[in-house]
Image (cartoon, rainbow, N blue to C red):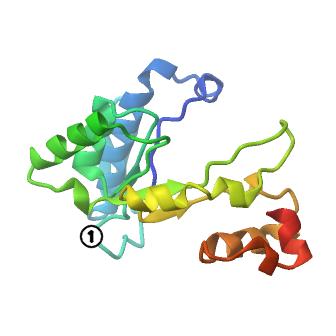
Amino acid sequence: MVQPTVSWHRDEYEAFGVPFERRGAVLDEVLTAMMALWGPSPASFHGEFFDFTDVYSEPKPFANGRPSMWFGGQAMHWPLLRRLVRYGDGFHPFGTPTADDLARLDAAFSGVGRRSSDLEWIGGTRATFDSPDAVAPLAASMESFAEQLAARYTTFCMKPSQHTDDINEIWVVDSRRCEARSVKQGDLTDERRRIL
């Protein structure tokens, strides 16, 4: 799975001397270059930002000629729709799409003979922090899972580091994410209850 993104952090672009305002054009060219690399070898590509000749990228992806590609963002803007329609296997919105957003998504997909219902919908935890250096309680972060499941979401992502700052507790966080929502905190060990 690949989730190409433009990022939101202007400093990242300035550090490399890339104009922040051109990040969408850079991403579009990256996608075209990746498709060339996942195709027959040797691959060549000559663009505005990237240029290579006779490059071997091996081994090739084993399914569909390329990895699954997820796209998302904080708004349903035209560049996101265009990338989803052309390359998208998964939709990973950062927030809750509105009814208008979903109508635009459905229309864009049907316009090219695809169904937006075939997309994998990616949701996740909604972490909240009591302070800048605090970790978020996992149980509270997972409260929206039932609502997300009812709204098309099939896959859930999380960052374990949002819920623990101890590398030895990662297994606890990840196993909790995988457990059924019916587990009550009273059934957990003291160590696990402390993390949740």
Q: Is residue 16 above or below residue 180?
A: above
Q: Is residue 57 left or right of residue 179?
A: left
Residue at the image position 24 percent from the left and 62 percent from the top: 118
Q: Position of residue 70 (x, y in %)?
A: 40, 54
Q: Is residue 78 above or below residue 19?
A: below
Identify the residue at the far right of this view: 190
Where disc 1 sits, the SS reads loop
Would you call the spot at circle 1 few (<14 residues within 10 Å), some (14-19), or many (20 or more)? few
Q: Is residue 5 left or right of residue 107?
A: right
Q: Is residue 126 above or below residue 118?
A: above
190 vs 62, nearest the viewer: 190
153 vs 10, nearest the viewer: 153
Residue at the image position 45 percent from the left and 28 percent from the top: 23
Residue 160 at least partly seen? no
In which quarter of the view is residue 141 placed? Answer: bottom right
Q: Position of residue 77 (x, y in %)?
A: 33, 30
Instruction: Tell me the quarter of the image containing the N terminus.
Output: bottom left
Q: Is residue 67 left or right of residue 140?
A: left
Residue at the image position 37 percent from the left and 70 percent from the top: 61
Find disc 1 in the rendering and name its residue: 64
The amino acid type of the residue labelled 1 equals Asn
72 vs 176, nearest the viewer: 176
Residue at the image position 62 percent from the left and 59 percent from the top: 142
Instruction: Tell me the quarter of the image containing the C terminus.
Output: bottom right
Q: Position of residue 33 (x, y in %)?
A: 34, 47
Residue 4 at least partly seen? yes
